[in-house]
Amino acid sequence: MAEKKPNDALVKLARAEDAKKAMAEYQANAKAVDANTERLRALRLEREAAEAAAPKAAPAPKRKPAAKKTKAATGKLSEWLTEQKGSGRNN
């Protein structure tokens, strides 16, 4: 069994104090997050109420879809190869 050291009680007290500080900090952070959430919720509800009260604007007219571009007429592969060879292109 492990022997007790003379400062074990002090270490235990220090850990307990650290735990209290950490828990207080954690709770303070949680409280701050809750307050911010409440503030943002109130702003959102206010904005939604204003939007509901405001008259709705007429929807924008729908645009006609752009005409699709047609693909240029493609030549044969053999023609393209001969053009490339004639222009001095190497493999």
Image (cartoon, rainbow, N blue to C red):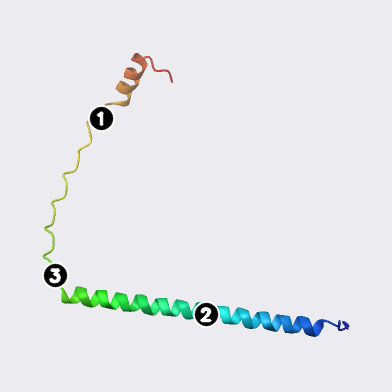
Query: Which residue is identified by label 1?
Result: 74
Could you classify mark 1 by the number of other residues whose Cα lies within 10 Å: few (under 14), some (14-19), or many (20 or more)?
few
- What kind of element bears circle 1? loop
- What kind of element bears circle 2? helix
Q: Residue 46, how many percent across, how many down?
A: 26, 77
Mark before the other along the chain sequence, 3 or 2? 2
**Which picture quadrant has residue 44?**
bottom left
Query: Which residue is identified by label 2?
Result: 28
For badge 2, the amino acid type reads Ala
Could you classify mark 2 by the number of other residues whose Cα lies within 10 Å: few (under 14), some (14-19), or many (20 or more)?
few
Q: Position of 16 compared to 38: left or right?
A: right
In depth, the one of 53 and 86 nearer the eye is 53
Residue at horizontal 77 percent and vertical 80 percent from the top: 11
Residue at horizontal 48 percent and vertical 81 percent from the top: 31
For badge 3, the amino acid type reads Lys
In depth, the one of 16 and 1 nearer the eye is 16
**Which picture quadrant has residue 24?**
bottom right
